[in-house]
Image: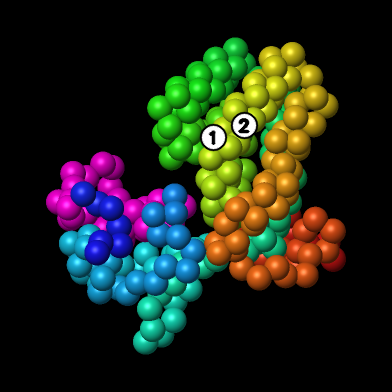
Amino acid sequence: MDILSTKGEKLAERPETGDPTIADRVFTTLHSAILTLQMPPGSKFSEAEIAKQLGVSRQPVREAFIRLAQIEFVRIQPKRATEVCKISEAAVLNARFIREALEAAVVRDACENCSDELIDQLEDIVERQRKAVAVNERELFHDLDDAFHRSIAEGSGRGLVWTLINEQKAQMDRVRYLSLAFNEPVVIREHAAIIDALRDRATSRAETAMRHHLSRINSLIAVLRQQHPQYFAATQAVQGTDAGPLNLRVPALVKPAR
């Protein structure tokens, strides 16, 4: 049985778009499969299995595994099968803490620098999300969700901030995707509220709307743990709403005071 649904197509046979390496394409394929639960938490597989199915050598698969391990999507076990990590509630809450702090600042800046073009772009994304719901395209909906937040960051001149957020939110993304089974209409309403605040240049309202939108993941975890307990790691000790020290893979932005 195939681990991945590739419809018989091999990565090496696919037309190139841009200049991705084979390892990049293996990473993207596996990342998508894990995110969308085609490869659910607890799944086990080997380099050889993935390489054979994707029609590539083992080296790019090994490189992709290392990148996936860095974002805690897989656990590499020497001389044993690689395993898809279960969702860590602590990691999700840490990612939410980072993302909320950054995006609250971004949306405040966006209010001060918001253009009509940005509002039109965001409205177009939300309309495309409505169409994605109508045809049950959850992966497209999820991609458009990212596009919505990325557009606000780029529209406010804070594109680098989105790069930092994207590096931290992998665990959060799996919860977000799982929740789309019942949460898509709510996401659309919350996106519309953010757009309304941006259109009115209402800074405090925009920040409140963004914080509410992102913090709801706390309650989503509780619902999803009941629906899919097999997907989640054992609960860890959590301080308040956040867990453990933050392990940020971000560059130092200021020099430490002496």
Q: x%, y% of residue 138?
A: 45, 37
**Does 123 lie within the magenta span?**
no
Q: Report the Cα–Cα distance between label 2 and label 1.
A: 8 Å
Q: Label 2 belongs to which residue?
A: 187
Q: Residue at x 30, y 62 (%)?
A: 3
Q: Is residue 15 left or right of residue 171?
A: left
Of 43 and 255, nearer the camera is 43
- Residue 59 vs 194, above or below: the answer is below
Q: Is residue 189 left or right of residue 31?
A: right
Q: x%, y% of residue 157?
A: 61, 31
Q: x%, y% of residue 102?
A: 70, 43
* Label drawn at residue 201: none
Q: Is residue 125 left or right of residue 45?
A: right
Tell me the quarter of the image containing the N terminus: bottom left
* Total numbered labels placed on residues in the image: 2
Element type where label 1 sits in the image: helix
Can I make out residue 177 in this image? yes
Q: Residue at x 60, y 53 (%)?
A: 227
Tell me the quarter of the image containing the C terminus: bottom right
Cβ–Cβ below 8 Å for labels 2 and 1?
A: yes
* Label drawn at residue 145: 1
Q: What secondary structure do most residues of the magenta stretch adopt?
A: helix
**Amino acid type shown at disc 1:** Asp
Residue 233 falls in which quadrant of the image? bottom right
Magenta stretch in the rendered image: 8-35
